[in-house]
Amino acid sequence: MNRDRASRRLPVLLSFLIGLMLTIMPLSGTLEMFRPDWIAMLVIFWAMQLPRTWGIGAAWVIGIILDVSQGTLLGQHALALGCVAFITVRLHLLMRVFPIVQLTATVFPILAIYQFLLFWINGVAGVNAPAMAYWGPVISSTLIWPLVMALLSALRYRVRSGG
Amino acid sequence: MVASRESNGNPGRIPALGARFLGLVFISILLMYFDNRDNHLDAVRTSIGAAVYPVRLIVDAPARIGNWITETTTSRSDLEQELKRLKAERLLTNARLQKLNALEAENARLRAMLDARAQFRDKTRVAEIMSVDANPYDHGLVIDIGSQDGVVDGQALVDADGVVGQVIKAGLLTSQAMLISDTDHALPVEVNRNGLRTIVVGTGTIDSLELPFVVNNADIRVGDLLVTSGLGGTFPAGYPVAIVDSVTRLPYEPYADVTAKPAASLGQVREVLLIYAAASEVQEASDE
């Protein structure tokens, strides 16, 4: 039973590890502005598919790790990711039956809220932020979402059948 | 209705979701409050940072492997050529060094005569850059040594051409640094030509800095070299920072519009020198 659970969690943890790598990978100036929010997308996907295991608690812990690795305020990404997970878990039944176009249209505002929270906390804490840095990740993440969705769905199928 | 389609037995509603969410929001805000005000949470940060260290290593691996491959597969003729070039360069620098030795001796003599405090050579250490900080709001990087090697907050980073930035958070194994081009970064400098003191501020663009507090009639020209003045206490004096690349004097404004280009190529550095200032040396000595 325990083993079974571990083997179910492994692919999800692996996906987050890869997401973390993609997030801290060095990119050049212009690309940096359009780095997708990999971790936020992963949180949305897993909170939608497995809301009991990968709900807001897990999202919060991942957010803390992200805060440490990016040197932001401790709790900033945690709060934003917790919020993303909350919305997704609330809507997960709807989102699961959405066709991909509609799902992407739902993911867009969630990511916008995520970026807004980060942006807003930065503002309150007195960190200077250029406004164009706000929309870049939201747009790139939304554009890449269908691809991420397809990849993760394949992985998701494996989690279910392999477990 | 939809809930009955659940395959892995999840009921549609997750109990106490709202309460848990509010709890986490509360904890986050508390954490951010304490993290922003003072450094009580540094221990937490350091320990989680150490846990993320392997991930950083993996991310860095492709670049390291690439370097290693290019190094090991360089052809013999290339190596010979480089050797020749380096020998020539060494001859040249040696010649310059001889002159410098004489000058240094002379300088020491003059200083002794003036009864001034002797200027020691700063202790340095090479650090490799592991990653550039992903946060688009600030210009930072992560280096591969931390408090284990005596890195402290506020330590200056330079490369072969000039000042790169300073350490802002020294972790156990890695440290985070802020580039001088960060909008939050300001650095006291002086014009090398005439000793005019001013402050260089980052603009958020990697190849441009600005000098917002230069009065209109100040003697500053395009091409002037700006060096650290050592007044802030963080950076030792005399390191090149930037070269002035435009001066616009507006008659109706109190300050001239001056921009400068960083001497160090901030976007391309892979190794940096950490400067152990005199203060930290004293501290280290007393620790031992």
Image: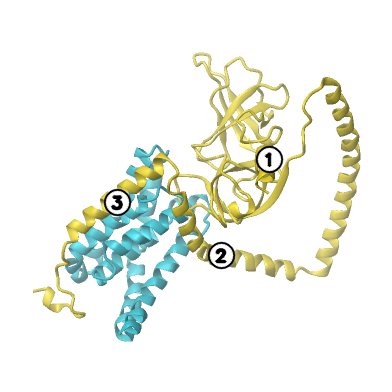
Chain colours: A cyan, B yellow
Mark 1, mark 2: which one is toward the viewer? 1
Where is residue B288 drawn, in percent x and y? 68, 49
Q: Residue B107: which quarter of the image?
A: top right
Image point (36%, 68%), residue name: A148
For label 3, the crowd category at 10 Å Cα-Cα, with few meaning under 14, some 14 to 19 and many 20 or more, is: some
Image point (15%, 73%), residue name: B11
Q: In the image as oriented, which residue stretches furthest toward the left?
A: B1
Image height of A44 relative to B285, above or below: below
Horizontal side, residue B168 vs residue B128: left or right: left
Quarter in which the N terminus of chain B is drawn: bottom left
Where is residue A68 drawn, in percent x and y? 44, 54
Q: Which mark is residue B57?
A: 2
Q: Residue B21: which quarter of the image?
A: bottom left
Residue identified by numbered label 3: B27
Q: Earlier in the sequence, mark 3 or mark 2?
A: 3
Name the amino acid, label 1.
Val
Name the amino acid, label 3.
Ile
Residue identified by numbered label 1: B282
